[in-house]
Amino acid sequence: MNEYAWLIRREFWENRAIWIVPAAIGAALTLAALFGNVQVPGLSVPDAHVFSGVVLFGFGAAFFVVMNIYATWYLLDCLYAERKDRSVLFWKSLPISDTATVLAKLFTGLIAIPLVYFVAADIATLLMAFIVSVRAHAVLGGSLWHPDLWLQLQVLWLYLIVTVALWFLPFAAYLLVISAWAKRAVTLWSIIPPLSAYLLERWFVGTHWVGTVLRDRALGYLPHAFRDNTGHGAWATAIVGDEPITAPASIWHLLDPVGFLSSPATWIGLTVGIALVMAAIQLRLRCTQT
């Protein structure tokens, strides 16, 4: 276990953007809250509660989007970069297995990086909420500090980290395979195999199974991880100015961990992901040069 801890520390040492990027986003959004134009029309207490939820969830969504982009780039580059600069020769001279190295990089991309963004988003959101509560209307300022709203934010982030890691494990492992195999142009090589498979199937077989599988995996996360629940107070509408805003009133009725874990698609994806991780380990075991 200590070996994995040091390997993950190594990833943070070699990839400082893991913490620099979320820190920069948090600083930019905090400055925007501090010096930006904060003009919110008068709101009733229920409307202010819904609107404050939109503000806080939107703030976290900005971090989540950037996190996914960076984690994708990290997984695609992490094994390729050490072959490109030949540092892989040094690391292979140490008593560290290829399995431990690949698993540490996978954990960093799927869990460690999201946790860093989670902490950064929490700190930045706290600062933003304090600034807005001072500058904005008193009703809105009070709604930003609703305890249940903050608890929902924490639970939602942690739920997303775990379920996204499980659901998108096949994609993450595939990126590791490309990173361990490609000698150059890793981004291009990550696109060519699925695109070629899709086109060849369409041209020679006339079916679209590959495209359907990729689409269902890429777009199927939300239906599997969340309920399409229109009742039980899960959604609320607020009138801000003259525009209605609909937002989750409570995430407790939207999360569906039992349905997610009992879905065959989840376990099929895990099986495929594990197979691809094993392939990445084998490729790193054999490839020591670019």
Image (cartoon, helix red, strand yellow):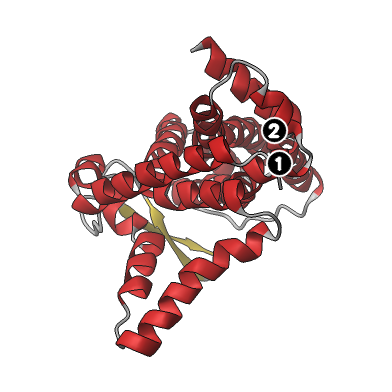
Specify the farthest residue to the right: 35
Q: Which residue is mark 1?
A: 83
Q: How many marks overall?
A: 2
Q: Nearer the viewer, residue 276 or 171?
A: 276
Q: Residue at x 67, y 46 (%)?
A: 80
Residue 187 lies in quadrant: bottom right
Q: Is residue 112 above or below residue 94?
A: below
Relative to 194, does residue 173 appear above or below in the rendering?
above
* Residue 88, numbered circle: 2
Q: CA distance from mark 2 to mark 1?
A: 6 Å
Q: Is residue 59 visible?
A: no
- The residue lying toward the viewer, choosing from 3 and 37, is 3
Residue type at numbered disc 1: Arg
Q: Secondary structure at mark 1?
A: helix
Horizontal arrangement in the rendering, residue 7 relative to residue 143 (left or right): right
> If you read the primary sequence from the N terminus, does the residue marked by circle 2 or circle 1 appear first?
1
> Dot 2, crowdedness within 10 Å: few (<14), some or many (≥20)?
some
Does residue 50 appear in the picture of this structure? yes
Please state which of residues 220 and 287 is positioned toward the viewer in this rendering.
Answer: 287
Q: Measured along the vertical axis of the image, is residue 286 above or below residue 224?
A: above
The residue depicted at 57 percent of the width and 61 percent of the height is: 190
Q: Position of residue 144 (x, y in %)?
A: 54, 38
Q: Which mark is residue 7?
A: none
Measured from the top left, where is residue 249 in percent x and y? 36, 49
Instruction: Determine whether label 2 and label 1 are within 8 Å by CB.
Output: yes
The amino acid type found where label 2 is placed reads Val
Q: Answer above or below: position of 154 versus 229.
A: above
Asked which secondary structure carries label 2, the reply is helix
Q: Position of residue 218 (x, y in %)?
A: 41, 62
Between 145 and 169, the residue placed more toward the observer is 169
Residue 241: quarter of image: bottom right
Q: Position of residue 79 (x, y in %)?
A: 63, 41
